[in-house]
Image (cartoon, grey):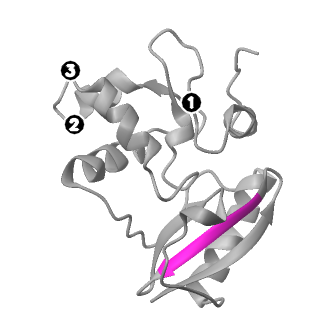
Amino acid sequence: MTNWMKKDTPIGEVYLADSDGKLSGLYFEEYRLPADRCEQQTPLLDEAARQLDEYFAGTRNSFDLPLAPAGTDFQQAVWQALCTIPYGKTCSYGDIAARIGKPKASRAVGGANNRNPIAIIIPCHRVIGSSGKLVGYGGGLPTKIHLLKLEGIETPE
């Protein structure tokens, strides 16, 4: 069973999911939550909410939570690579592809980025196009811009 809670943030409501004591989701839309969910706060969800508050207040630049994103081996490799992008920095899909040893897989990296089940905490918002342009984001480009600006990253408008 997956426990979940709704959290108000400066970018709108997000939905946190806890599966077996590990954070398994941070979603922008309720429809992406697992079907077997139960609305119930847990100590982990409370801690995730607290850390998100600190992040949005500008007092936290990394998260310390047990994570359990569900995905393929390739997606897992991409998501692990995303976690190595420092706060306040960006990189391209091609950079991530190279980091995971698949330098020609930038499109597939984009697909894995799109399927990231733990947005913000697994920082897919820090990935930009090779031209330096902002490209799609599951929470919408205004949300991506907000997150990047929060981290001190200049964004093209």
Name the residue that disc number 2 marks.
Answer: 100
Comes first in the chain, label 1 or label 2: 2
Work out whether 31 lies above or below 34. Answer: above
Mark 2 element type: loop
Q: State how far apart marks 1 and 2 are (Cα).
A: 21 Å
Which amino acid type corresponds to the residue marked 2 in the rendered image? Ile
Question: Considering the numbered disc 1 on the image, is that residue within a helix, a strand or a loop?
Answer: loop
User: In the picture, which quadrant includes the N terminus?
Assistant: bottom left
Q: What mark, if any, has residue 136 been given in the picture?
A: 1
Query: Where does the magenta region start and end?
Result: 13-18
Mark pair 1, 3: CA separation: 20 Å
Q: Nearer the viewer, mark 2 or mark 3?
A: 3
Closer mark to the observer between disc 1 and disc 2 = 1
In this view of the protein, can residue 100 be seen by the observer?
yes
Q: Is residue 15 magenta?
A: yes
**Marks 2 and 3, how far apart in space?**
11 Å
Type of amino acid under label 1 = Gly
Q: Quadrant of residue 89?
A: top right
Which secondary structure class fits the magenta region best? strand
Label 3 amino acid?
A: Lys
Q: Read off the residue under disc 3.
A: 104
Q: Secondary structure at mark 3?
A: loop
Residues 15 and 90: in front is: 15
Front-most of residues 37 and 47: 37
| Image point (20%, 53%), residue name | 73
Residue at image point 28% right, 53% down: 76
Which of label 1 and label 3 is nearer to you? Answer: 1
Quadrant of image for the C terminus? top right
Vertical side of 38 occupied by 125: above or below: above
Pick whichever, 34 or 21, lies toward us.
34
The quadrant where residue 150 appears = top right
